[in-house]
Amino acid sequence: MIPANFDYESPRTLSEALELLASREDAKILAGGHSLLPAMKLRLAQPALLVDIGRIGGLSYVRESGEHIRIGAMTTHAEIASSKVLQRFSPLLPQAACQIGDMQVRNCGTIGGSLAQAHPAADYPAVVLALDAEIVVASRTGEREIPAREFFTGMFSTELHPHEIITEIRVPRTDDQGIAYKKHHHPASGYAVVGVAVRLKLSVGKIDTVAIGITGVGQNAYRATAVENALRGKPVAAIREATAHVAKNVEVLSDNYASSDYRQHLAAVLTRRALEQAAGGRAK
Amino acid sequence: MKDVTITVNGVEHRAQVEPRLLLVHFLRELAGLTGTHIGCETSLCGACTVLVDGRAVKSCTVLAVQADGHKVTTVEGLANGDRLHAIQEGFWEEHGLQCGFCTPGMIMCSHDLLKQHPSPSDSEIREAINGNLCRCTGYQHIVNAVRSASRKMSKRVSARAAAAR
Amino acid sequence: MARNGKPRRAPRSNGKTNGHAKAAHWVGRKLKRKEDPRLIQGITHYTDDLKLPRMLYCTLVRSPYAHAEIRGIRTDAARAVSGVAGVFTAEDTASLGMVPCAIQMPDLKVPKHPVLATDRVRYVGEPVAAVVADDLYAARDAAELVEVDYEPLPVVTDMQKALSNDTPYVHDEFRSNKAFTHTLKNGDIAAAFKKADRVVKQRMLNQRLAPIAMETRAVLAEYLPGEHRLTVWSSTQIPHLLRTQVSVMLGLPETAVRVIAPEVGGGFGSKLNVYAEEGLIPWLAMKLGRPVKWSETRRENFTATIHGRDTINDVELALKKDGTVLGLRVRILADLGAYHQLLTPLIPQLTALMLAGCYKFPAIDIEIQGVFTNKMSTDAYRGAGRPEATYIVERIMDIAAHELGMDSAQFRLKNFPQPKEFPFTTITGLTYDSAKYQESLKRALQLAGYDTLRRRQKNGWKQGKYYGVGVSTYVEICAIGPSAATPAGGWESGTVRVEPTGKVTVLTGASPHGQGQETTFAQLIADELGIDPEDVSVVHGDTMAVPYGIGTFGSRATAVGGTAAYLATQKLKAKMATLAAHLLGSTPGDITIGRGHLTAKRNKKSISFGELVMAAYTARNIPPGFEPGMEATHFFEPSNFTFPFGAHIASVEVDAETGEVKVDKYVAVDDCGNVINPLLVDGQIQGGIAQGIGQAMWEELIYNEEGQLVTGSLMEYALPKAHFLPEFTLDRTVTPSPVNPMGVKGVGEAGTIASTPCMVNAVCDALSPLGIRHIEMPLKPERVWRAIIQVQAAPKEPEPAIVPALAAAAARKPAQKTARRRV
């Protein structure tokens, strides 16, 4: 219940935060705190310095910007879930956001924090993958963009360097596409046992664009590229067969709630259902 | 140690705290407000729910230093003198509690819900309180309590609006 | 006849009270609870809310191993932490008595159970050292620095392995892991099975559960050396029994110990116990001369507060082909864990008693073995033995109905005793007080729209949709109970005192933790005295204020504690009538009490309630030999248990592709005898149903082979959440109990007992056309999915594609010909 001691700084600017982060070996960023603090309370995480970025202005926003929507890293799940801009132009994110944790968690947890933690069963990773989002990160030396597809590298591990901070997530407009997020909630934790985010565009009855992001199944969220390839150019009727192997070549997780066999099966079923929904029910 | 100033139920509390002090311990141990309970250490039971700047949060998963300069409302801050808040009345009238341990968290969570959605459906109420565990009631009377509170609050809002006209 | 010799009361609904004038009918009303204003405002105190001057905080160091030798403990580093007042191990606490077990049985092996582990630890979470410091954070930091040198030993977690020859012993001194064997046999079981047309067999597990009261346990103790007085605040269901045990553990006179149960945030049986910490914390307070508080974390609550259930049951039911039950044979292995807590070995025996369910079994044969394993103790968890019994009976009855191709409701109706057969003596030797099982079941069928549900089910099967209808009828044993059948006395105390101003104080030994006795007892006493419940204050949970009592558990508070208060009130009313007769110039038999007055019928003179009471206290004008004051106490010893009953029906849909189960309807018709406050009765039932569904669907404590509790947090152990559950439809029948004068039975556990088998019956029913017979709890989607794919993969099984045809066949003549699989 009680975290070990740590030093604490709450910088007012991003550059101050980046300096602090670089100043100590085992410094950690505190965003919404809803992944880090529970781990610290169980003393599974014992950072020496917490850099609280909650007081840096201007990191919480949702803005339209041409073909993209830009989301500040400190935007909470609740803000994403209720964002009119996202609901209109890129509704996959709000659809997943409203299924994260519970109301209190959504009021505090942030998209940047969730992505940086890269929990293998978090919801956002599947979504940003399916959206081909860009994750913008800052360090003392400047800014870089990491494509979502390159971001997740393993369980709780990402392309993010220790001294970098996520500042923004850029997602494309998908208002010309069907989208769906299907999730099997763990009944206790609320995490995704399997979460499947898809977007899909049909062109004269054939699948033109398709993207499938899957969380909860592997060490980290992934794109089901083989299924996407098998579906491109095919009619929606091909979905059932193509999705059967959505977890093939993945080292599938197993726990007391769901074995790897079941997760794999669930991934196939939920992927099919998500694609069918995204195709507007025309896939039967 | 860090200096913090947290306004709890309209009263300013200043203290020097360890950065690791959890908001729930600040409230219970330093501010002496024990209506906010601790039911787990994994941010899942919701017993410690309070409002920070009006939004429901689990005070076991917030550091007191994060709440520095913010306004916190706990269950003790809801009633106006002898007059109970409509949500408290709802819980009382609909028998929305038994042992009462989860109740302050349930009430604070419902407060946020009703601010965002003044007339929620039963299933919206159930979704909204899914981060608050109750082992006594089976939730049915809690749903009734929130529904009843929502009706009361809507009535009061329309009565106030009518009076203003 | 009720044992106290008072005339038995008619059902309360007629409003008459023992020949006195009409009461105000507070009983039967949905009164708002008197306890709520303080709870909804957060202005009351649970144990952890209390803070005393100079108070210290205790954190316990617990074993991370399920079985290990303790080679040594180093505490220097912990002691050096700023603010630490002391670190204590078993060497220091040698003078403390053992953690008590109240159960005595022939051949029962009772291991030594020290407050802190001495040379060995036997389960993960066993307390090893206590760290006491000025503040909680320092105590926690110091606890990290206590170094214990463990030598891990082989672990036994599987009950069946624990009974084999080559197994580690949990307690070497017994040379066996078998703690007891309990048998109950009656009727000619051999003949029953010999003449049976059909024998239905099934192994079924009742998984280990965590009670999870939302308030974890907490203990605060203060010792005042000058007064030789120890005060212990504990989150307990049994303050008086705890006082006795604490005085024994500490070697103090019982008069020096005061136990207070402040607000208690739920118990569900988990606080019907005496724990190591309840001896240790008072000892620390005495040792250090300062108040000491310990509050359990949820992790500790999972590992070191008692668990419930955990049995393996082999069940055989002998039947005639017309569906008449002939005999039941049950073999049970009960996992007791490493040590006996207060009632550990008793719980399986309650299962044995209730295995006749609400059916007429001519013969029964039960054998239960209690087994030690390297786990936390099992003990009373909501229902305590009865849910296990009901699960066995209701599952095997349902499986039998399916095998015989009978409707599961009709099959049950066939085997109920008739109402005129009550009091009904069961094959297990109990006397059921009163019941109309037919009535509650028929009402439930009607409310659920049973025929419609069955039609939907058949149509659904044709379309590949799996709807299931679960029926469960139950009887439970409540109002625990006659003292001869209980380990620590089964009576309860009640004191009623009318204060000089006419306000009434009721003292009850049945210390509540959410049940609402402050309201229901006030309603009851207000009616008896013709006053308003607002004028009745119910006091409980303080051994210094309340005469010795037993506590709240086993659905006993109203039926035993309420009766005690009721009978105390009768004594008081007789006394009032004597004084009133004296003052009004009449005879006691002529006096009526009601509407705040006592009236002499013949001369129409009356005196107000307040004046009369004041006269009893001023005592200037009292009859000769009349004792001044207005207080009476009754210790009520029930002549029998009570036996509430009911029928529950669940309607579910199973997603055959994912194994997910959706509950779309849940109907419960319960009969707890007369009802004092319908709102509170409904609350008990709803909460109970949710908890029982929790066991059926989600809850499961899993120890791995190393004895680690792998579902030991709310991240893994799934309690029912609001959106998992449908709105329950409740109704009741009212069959008063003849055991107590109020005709009440008890309702605290009913929902939990009925709903678990109801849900499993519903899911298995849904999948019956696939040939699925039984799925173990909890019905996690994966389990259900596996059951389905196993029957689909089995050779000579019908293909899923022809399920509709099969379903049609099953509807005509189900079951026998389809292959069966247990998962």
Image (cartoon, coloured by chain):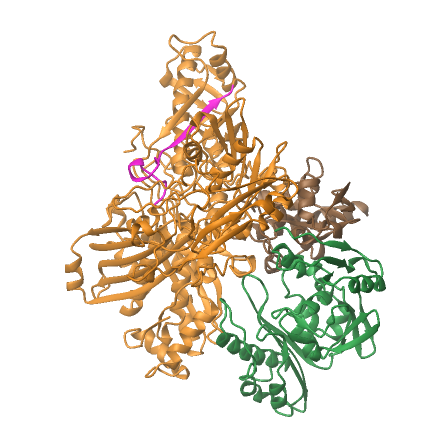
Chain colours: A green, B brown, C orange
Q: Nearer the viewer, residue C64 or C145?
A: C145
Q: Residue C85, position in %: x, y?
A: 60, 38
Q: Residue A83, position in %: x, y?
A: 75, 67
C118 over A221 or under it: above or below: above
> Is residue C749 a member of the stretch shown in magenta?
no
Q: Residue C13, position in %: x, y?
A: 41, 38
Residue A172 appears in the figure: no
How many numbered discs sit on the rendered protein? 0
Q: Residue C374, position in %: x, y?
A: 40, 55
**Residue found 65% across the figure and 57% down from its top:** A40
- In the shown orientation, is residue C721 left or right of residue B24? left
Range of magenta residues: C477-499
**Residue found 44% across the figure and 28% down from its top:** C252
- In the shown orientation, is residue C804 left or right of residue A219? left
Q: Quadrant of residue C556?
A: top left
Q: Quadrant of the N terminus of chain C?
A: top left
- In the shown orientation, is residue C326 left or right of residue C501? left
Q: Quadrant of residue A72?
A: bottom right
Residue C718 appears in the figure: yes
Q: Nearer the viewer, residue C251 or C215?
A: C251
Q: Quadrant of the C terminus of chain C?
A: bottom left
C571 over C457 or under it: above or below: above
Q: Nearer the viewer, residue C488 or C290?
A: C290
C789 over C38 or under it: above or below: below
Q: Quadrant of residue A95?
A: bottom right
> Is residue C492 a member of the stretch shown in magenta?
yes
A214 over C133 or under it: above or below: below
Q: Nearer the viewer, residue A86 or C104?
A: C104
